Amino acid sequence: MVSVSSNRPADAKPPHLRPPHLQPEVKRSAQGDWRLFLRLMPYILQNRRRLILPLLLLVPLSLAQALQPVLIGQAISLIKQENAAWDIFATMSLRTGLNWIIGGLLIAIAIRLALDGWQSYQIQAVGQNITAAIRNDLFGHVTNLSMGFFDRTPVGRLITRLTSDVNALGDVFSTGAIGIISDLFLILVLMGTMLQQEWRLGLMLIAMLLPVTALIIYFQQQYRKANYKAREELSTLNSDLQENISGINVVQLFRRERFNAELFRTVNNRYVNALDKTIFYDSAVSATLEWIALVAIAGVLALGGSLVTGGMMEIGTLTAFILFAQKLFDPLRQFADKFTAIQAGLTAVERLNDLMSEPIAIRDPKNPVSLPSSTLADNETVVPGEIRFDNVSFGYKADDYVLKDLNFTIRPGEKVALVGPTGAGKSSIIRLLCRLYEVSKGQILLDNVDIRDIAQRELRDRMAIILQDGFLFSGDVARNITLGENYSFEQVRRAAGQTNVDQFIEALPQGYHTALRQRGTNLSGGQKQLLAFARAAIRNPGILVLDEATANLDVGTEAMIQQALDQLLENRTAIIIAHRLSTIRNVDRILVLKQGQLIEQGSHEQLIQVDGLYASLYKLQMLGQ
């Protein structure tokens, strides 16, 4: 039920609207790739049993591939009656020997076809499990971060990290990590087989791998930097998109379509330019490997041809090495492609690591204090709480306090109104009381216990807050009243009846089961506000906070809800924020704030007699009416 708007200073532009020279530099983690990998180890270890089989399958798959060039070379040697043919084939007739070789090739191909798909399925399944676990942990971490983090972080950036970055990380496991191990293992098997078959050609091909590997590493490092920049630009693009869609009514009402389209085009072009760099480096790797593969075949033909003409090697072995040259660079090419996925994944890990490293500023104490139950045995009467602000100072920025040395006590069952000009700190008091933010100085006491010593769940269970703009989730009406808590349908109906909103709900097409669209767009602003009253009533809190709770209601609806509100406020501690001062004349006490300081307090009549700020505000409103 708590919704807090951003407190970004009015003159501070979001990052994507700053001029290019004021754009922040791309942040790159100082951690090495190994430390980033270690950050993922807990997720890998959770799936270690499912990784055993894919790793074991590397052996038959690699041997099956390495055997193919050897068998083809044997076929050529057998046809030409060369000495390189194995003894087992040399004793057979030509047709029988070729049939055995063809059978061996078919078996090798069958092994690869059968096991390759199985291994791929197992790897992809593990990758999806790891991705889901990381996404769950990220979501849980983000929802526990303080409001201060969300004040400075655009929603689009968070969505990018929870979707695009996590998916890129998933590619590391599903197509990259095990695939690279497979490719490396195959290269080692091929190298060993080549050296055993003909060490001179084998050494030549192995020597060609060294400069190629160095070049690939260089291109991949450049790709990593370009990919980080591209993902930062994608975050900015998503932030801009989310902002425009969320504020589409303002965009259209003030005819900002063309202006916003130009801003979006600028951001989009920056993203495309950054993405082009990643494509360039990725293509450079592929092109390099294609040329090197051709050079390797030419080298085999040159050196192998001289060995054949010199009688030092036979044509069957040369044929096998031509195939070895092709097969050796195939896993290297695949290795490069997967290495690109690895680099993109490591970029994602850097960004996700930044998010996971964001400290949770507001935590429960190790040994929380349990307060006595606020609900009596009959489950109808509640015990109101006492609230005390003791020298409380607070600022959204460290050097800019919006509340200064606040001292006041709200006694159990007392109805207190907070009054003051815009920016006086009224809503900040509510946010501190709910512990959405931590106080900078002083302490807030609930029933003589510092709220920092109380578990957040218990603290927020003791109060219900009705804001001016009630937020609704996708789902039906009943679920938006219970908000996931285990309340019976009868309790939902009783809460709606207590607040006089049952008639409005039952008039909906499916009553309490009417499906609400995102943010409740199929309800009016007043109807959404009415559901907030039912939310508060069903929780039966000891403390009730109303922040301009009736501002969106018409006169008739407000009169209807006022009777229920008077009943809801009975025997509860209440804090009421209202700009219409006529609605708070009957409260027990009024606290008048100005620039974060308490300057007046008393009843309506007492403050009128004082003839201070409250009296001035009241007279201005009466004059306006």
Image (cartoon, rainbow, N blue to C red):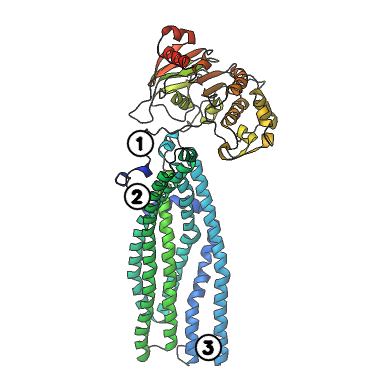
Dot 2 or dot 3: first in sequence order is: 2
Cα distance in 3D space between marks 2 and 3: 60 Å
Question: For the residue labelled by badge 2, is the local secondary structure a helix, a strand or a loop?
Answer: loop
Q: Tag 1, which secondary structure?
A: loop
Question: Residue 172 at x, y = what percent?
Answer: 46, 57
| 130 over 396 or under it: above or below | below
Residue reaching furthest to the top? 609
Binning the other alpha carbons within 10 Å of mark 3 as few (below 14), some (14 to 19) or many (20 upward) gives some
Task: Name the image quarter holding the N terminus.
Answer: top right
Mark 2, mark 1: which one is toward the viewer? 1
Determine whether, in the image, residue 522 is placed left or right of residue 187. right
Horizontal side of 304 relative to 110 (left or right) equals left
Q: How many marks?
A: 3
Spot occupied by residue 407 in the image (x, y as percentages of width and height):
41, 17
Q: Nearer the viewer, mark 3 or mark 1?
A: 1
Indicate which label's residue lies in the foreground, 2 or 3.
2
Residue 199 in the image: state x and y as whole percent. 38, 80
Contact (Cβ within 8 Å) of mark 3 with mark 1 = no
Residue on which disc 2 sits: 28
Q: Is residue 589 above or below residue 335?
A: above
- As displayed, is residue 231 above or below residue 512? below
Return the x and y of residue 570 as percentages of the image width and height: 60, 16
Which amino acid type corresponds to the residue marked 3 in the rendered image? Phe
- Residue found at the far left of this picture: 21
Q: Is residue 573 visible?
A: yes
The residue that disc 1 covers is 12
Q: Give me the disc on residue 89.
A: 3
